[in-house]
Amino acid sequence: MANELETGLPSIRQIQTLIREDKEVEIKLLTNDLVTGKIRWQDTNCVCLVDHYDQQTVIWIQAIAYLKPKG
């Protein structure tokens, strides 16, 4: 059986809201890298971030130190 997003969790709802509202976010990785862009999708393991150049980056959730709306 496939894992499904637990849409009742506040973190999942917050990311879904950021996707729906097309908000730019800042993601700090455990490597101390900082990436910005808009989240296009999420699944149980990853989020897809699209930057200003329309470059898609898939980020493992385990690699994220924090995620916050930019601005």
Image: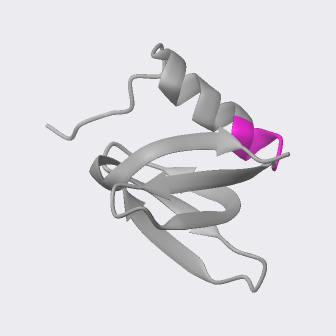
The answer to which of 39 and 6 lies nearer the viewer is 39
- Residue occupying image coordinates x 65% and y 53%: 26
Query: Which quadrant does the C terminus fall into?
Result: top right
The part of the chain drawn in magenta is 18-22
Q: Position of residue 64 (x, y in %)?
A: 39, 50
Please state if 24 lies on the left or on the right of 4 as rendered.
Answer: right
Which residue appears farthest toward the front when viewing the image? 32
Residue at the location (58% across, 24% down)? Answer: 13
Q: Is residue 56 above or below residue 61?
A: below
Residue 26 relative to residue 57: left or right: right
Residue placed farthest to the left in the image?
Answer: 1
Q: Residue at x 34, y 55 (%)?
A: 30
Name the main secondary structure of what is drawn in magenta: helix
Q: From the viewer's side, name the closer residue of 36 and 43.
A: 36
Please tell me which residue lies in front, 37 or 20.
Answer: 37
| Image-quadrant location for residue 46 | bottom left
Q: Is residue 15 above or below residue 56?
A: above
Q: 50 or 65: which is nearer to us?
A: 65
Residue 57: where, in percent of width, then height?
A: 51, 74
> Residue 50: horizontal and vertical position, in percent?
66, 70
Whether residue 33 appears in magenta in the rendering, the answer is: no
Q: Indicate the quadrant containing the N terminus: top left, top right, bottom left or bottom right.
A: top left
Q: Assess whether residue 19 is covered by the magenta stretch.
A: yes
Name the residue located 32 percent from the left edge and 55 percent from the top edge: 63
Left or right relative to 49: residue 18 = right
Q: In the rendered view, tell whether residue 8 sits above or below residue 67.
A: above
x, y percent for residue 40: 64, 58
